[in-house]
Amino acid sequence: MPDYMLMVLENETEHAAQSPAAMAGLIEQRARFVGRLRSAGQLRDHGRFRPSREGKRARRHGARLEVEGSPFAQAGKDGKEDAKALGAFYWVQAATVEEATQLAIECPALASDQIDVRPVMKGRGDPDKEAKPGKIFGFVVLGNALSENQWVDVMDRIDAETSVNLPDSFLGGVRLEPPTSGRRVETRGGRRAMFDGPFLESKEVIGGLFFVRVTSHDDALRWFADSRHGVHGAIEIRELWRS
């Protein structure tokens, strides 16, 4: 059965404005959602990221490593600010993209959030990644291109140069299919609505996710500095909450 990544793009300002009771309720709803996916045999992995203000975004310019802190809000190609950050993910199995999109519609989220549904091109999971103590960092692979064909070329180069010599601390990850193969779920008029891709209106589009066990953001950056991930695109480094 095909794999899909459901990526919850959260409006962090709206999340911060929620009461503690409301956020606890949302977390509980998502825990029940995970339980339903697991019971149905559809869940391969899931996780929730700590706030983007704690993360880093990095890229290489020749020998120089450029690192920026959050917020990661950026002007899209239409000039509007994109203030959403990846807040959670669900790696699921579904028969079709329509079935995966229905799961996204059922996923608990605030009305201001978006959920992107992207088919997985290839991936390697580690179901025991939380079995050992320590921090787990997600590395979000970002590509910047004017067209989807150019974006695919960027992802191909990153893939070709980073698929070998993975560290012992590598905990799996996925490469995603191009944006046109995906769907986006948003709340419109109080109801969830589905839209087809592409989603290249942002400057940088997610091409994959992978996970590494390191002790801190500084260690994550040191690991990244020796990799080829930032040569052609950028990486957003975010710690996962432990469940």
Image (cartoon, helix red, strand yellow):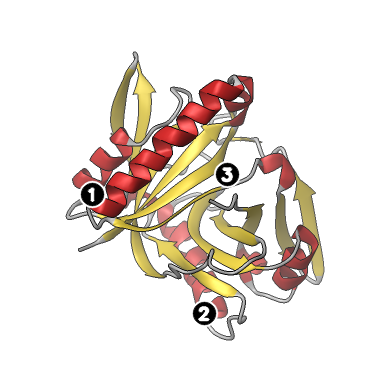
| Dot label at residue 130 | none
Relative to 113, is 33 above or below? below
The residue tagged with tag 1: helix, strand or loop?
helix
- Residue in the foreground of this view, choosing between 164 and 78: 164
The residue tagged with tag 3: helix, strand or loop?
loop
What is the spatial separation of the Cα atoms under label 2 and label 3, in whole angstroms? 25 Å
Amino acid type at mark 1: Val
What is the spatial separation of the Cα atoms under label 1 and label 2, in whole angstroms? 27 Å
User: Is 88 on the left-hand or right-hand side of 134?
Assistant: left
Residue that badge 1 annotates: 97
Rendered location of residue 188, percent (x, y): 35, 19
Residue reaching furthest to the bottom: 165
Residue neighbourhood size for the residue with mark 2, other residues' Cα within 10 Å, grouped as few (<14), some (14–19), many (≥20): few
Q: Nearer the viewer, mark 2 or mark 3?
A: 2
Q: Along the polypeptide, which appears first: circle 1 or circle 3?
A: 1
Rendered location of residue 130, percent (x, y): 54, 63
Amino acid type at mark 3: Lys
How many numbered marks, from 0 up? 3
- Do callouts 2 and 3 mark residues in contact (Cβ within 8 Å)? no
> In this rendering, does residue 198 appear at all?
no
What is the spatial separation of the Cα atoms under label 1 and label 3, in whole angstroms? 25 Å
User: Is 6 on the left-hand or right-hand side of 69?
Assistant: left
Q: Along the polypeptide, which appears first: circle 2 or circle 3?
A: 2
Residue that badge 3 annotates: 203
> In this rendering, does residue 47 appear at all?
yes
Relative to 21, is 119 above or below? below
Residue that badge 2 annotates: 163
Res. 120 image quadrant: bottom left
The residue tagged with tag 2: helix, strand or loop?
loop
Residue at point 20%, 63% (across, down): 1
Rendered location of residue 184, percent (x, y): 35, 38
